Image (tube, grey):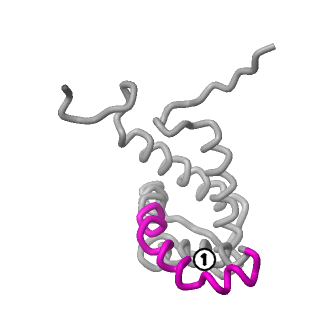
């Protein structure tokens, strides 16, 4: 019996680190598309991806519950504002990461979300790339 649990030979941290890399890719793409988003270094970009994961795991659920009536009235669109707020919070907490406006944060959160959604379709829960094949 192994001291460290694994899923089919893949360490559990592999999936987490892979998802952080995907978020970092989304943030990097957002800097290329949006002029008001800036990272000083690649290390700051990776730190922002890691911190965004922590903020989304700890603070975002609380914000979603507290704003549930507003989210229901807007048919879920207020979640976009919450996502932009989480990205803005990361920018406040992390030196070397700046966002110029709410609209830049909203655009960046959309880019990160779409990038993560596409990549999650290719990566399974185990952190390995999934191969989708159809039978004829």
The percent coordinates of residue 113 (x first, y second) are 65, 58
Q: Who is closer to the viewer here, 133 or 80?
A: 133
Q: Dividing the picture into quarters, in which one does residue 70 lie?
A: bottom right
Residue occupying image coordinates x 57% and y 78%: 85
Q: Who is closer to the viewer here, 117 or 47?
A: 117
Secondary structure beneath dot 1 equals helix
The percent coordinates of residue 69 (x first, y second) are 64, 85
Q: Is residue 21 above or below residue 122?
A: below
Q: Who is closer to the viewer here, 57 or 1?
A: 1
> Pointer 1: what residue?
82
The percent coordinates of residue 22 (x first, y second) are 55, 48
- Which residue occupies the extreme right position in the image? 136
Answer left or right for 63 relative to 72.
left
The N terminus lies in which quarter of the figure? top left
Q: Is residue 97 above or below residue 67?
A: above
Answer left or right for 111 relative to 2.
right
Answer left or right for 66 relative to 35.
left
Q: Is residue 33 above or below residue 69?
A: above
Residue occupying image coordinates x 50% and y 48%: 19
Answer left or right for 33 relative to 96.
right
- Name the magenta segment's main secondary structure: helix
Residue occupying image coordinates x 60% and y 44%: 120
Part of the protein shown in magenta: 52-75
Q: Who is closer to the viewer here, 26 or 99?
A: 26
């Amino acid at each position: 019996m192994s001291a460290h649990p694994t899923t089919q030979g893949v360490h559990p941290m592999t999936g987490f680190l892979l998802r952080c890399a995907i978020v970092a890719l989304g943030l990097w793409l957002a800097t290329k598309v949006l002029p008001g988003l800036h990272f000083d270094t690649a290390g700051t970009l990776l730190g922002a991806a890691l911190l965004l994961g922590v903020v989304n795991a700890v603070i975002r659920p609380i914000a979603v519950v507290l704003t549930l009536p507003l989210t229901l009235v807007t048919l879920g669109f207020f979640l976009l504002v919450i996502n932009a707020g989480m990205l803005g919070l990361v920018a406040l907490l992390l030196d070397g990461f700046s966002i110029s406006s709410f609209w830049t944060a909203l655009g960046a959160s959309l880019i990160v979300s779409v990038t993560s959604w596409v990549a999650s379709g290719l990566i399974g829960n185990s952190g390995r790339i999934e191969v989708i094949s159809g039978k004829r």
